[in-house]
Image (cartoon, rainbow, N blue to C red):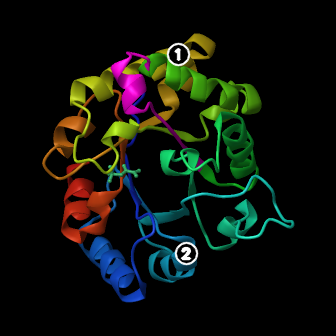
Amino acid sequence: MLDRPKLVVANRKMHGNLPDNRQFMQSLLQQTQQHSARYAICPPHPYLYQAQQLLQNSHIAWGGQNMSRFEHGAYTGSVSPLMLKEFGCTYVIIGHSERRQRGHENDETCGERFEAALKAGLTPILCIGETLEEYERGETDLVVVRQLNPVIAHVGIQALSQGVIAYEPVWAIGTGKAATPQHAQAILSFIRGHIGLLNEQVSEKIGLLYGGSVNPGNAAQLLGMPDVDGGLIGGASLVTEDFIRICQIA
Ligand code: PEP
């Protein structure tokens, strides 16, 4: 089995301001060190320049929370992959449930975005996961396959391994009700197995994250599961000490 590095990503959603971000990033720089785990911060887009100024040449990467599938054009309010790259982004989140639910993204356009991110030299973090109703109907496996397959069909299985997949059950996001470590492990193992049906090496190599109410109290157990290669952290990334603690645990 490959030794996959852990990755911890802060999804700061639509929170923060210049002084607050500065304090967050400077504390992170001071209180985490380069070791086997990798860290990244995804602030709202206007703050990417600030992230670039504060984090460049450090052990902490940064990324966008979304992007257009197009490079340029008449797409008011959108951000192009080339723009994210120009501001030094390493990562971009694609298909977050908060965007899927509002109709901004779907399984097909996620494939196009994933491809566009790779073309621009970004690492896409593809979010997939079931709603509460789907979970209660026992459809989690079906849903994650339904969300993953169009992306695989679009980019091909080899290209998939250049991205990261985050399993984020919608019922766990921002609710304080994290999945149990056993559930996260079972689904991520299922996702890895599904990818392995197409290509064993890609399935061993690809980074799989868990996201949904991760906090300093549950991070050790969740991130300690064998198929959990890290976490996508929303609410806990708004409390500097909590996010730093999660990074240290990873
Ligand atoms: C998220 O929105 O990606 C997320 C994981 O949020 P939270 O940690 O707040 O559940």
Q: Is mark 1 within 8 Å of ligand 1?
A: no
Q: Residue at x 49, y 45 (%)?
A: 97
Q: Earlier in the sequence, mark 2 or mark 1?
A: 2
**Residue type highlighted by circle 1:** His
Residue interval drawn in magenta: 124-139
Give the crowd class for mark 1: few <14, some 14-19, many >=20 residues within 10 Å: some
Q: Residue at x 57, y 45 (%)?
A: 100
Q: Position of residue 35 (x, y in %)?
A: 32, 55
**Residue type highlighted by circle 2:** Leu
Q: Is residue 135 magenta?
A: yes
Q: Residue at x 66, y 66 (%)?
A: 84
> Where is mark 2, residue-wise?
48
Q: Position of residue 119 (x, y in %)?
A: 76, 50
- Horizontally, residue 1 falls left or right of residue 45, namely left
- Horizontally, residue 59 falls left or right of residue 150, namely left
From the viewer's side, name the closer residue of 92 and 212: 212
Q: CA distance from mark 2 to mark 1?
A: 35 Å
**Residue at the far left in the pictured view:** 217
> Where is mark 1, residue-wise?
194
The secondary structure type at the circle numbered 1 is helix
Give the crowd class for mark 2: few <14, some 14-19, many >=20 residues within 10 Å: many
Looking at the image, is 195 positioned above or below residue 234?
above
Q: Is residue 7 magenta?
A: no
From the viewer's side, name the closer residue of 69 and 209: 69
From the viewer's side, name the closer residue of 235 and 245: 235
Looking at the image, is 53 positioned above or below residue 35?
below
Instruction: Tell me the number on the disc at residue 226.
Output: none
Looking at the image, is 187 positioned above or below residue 106?
above
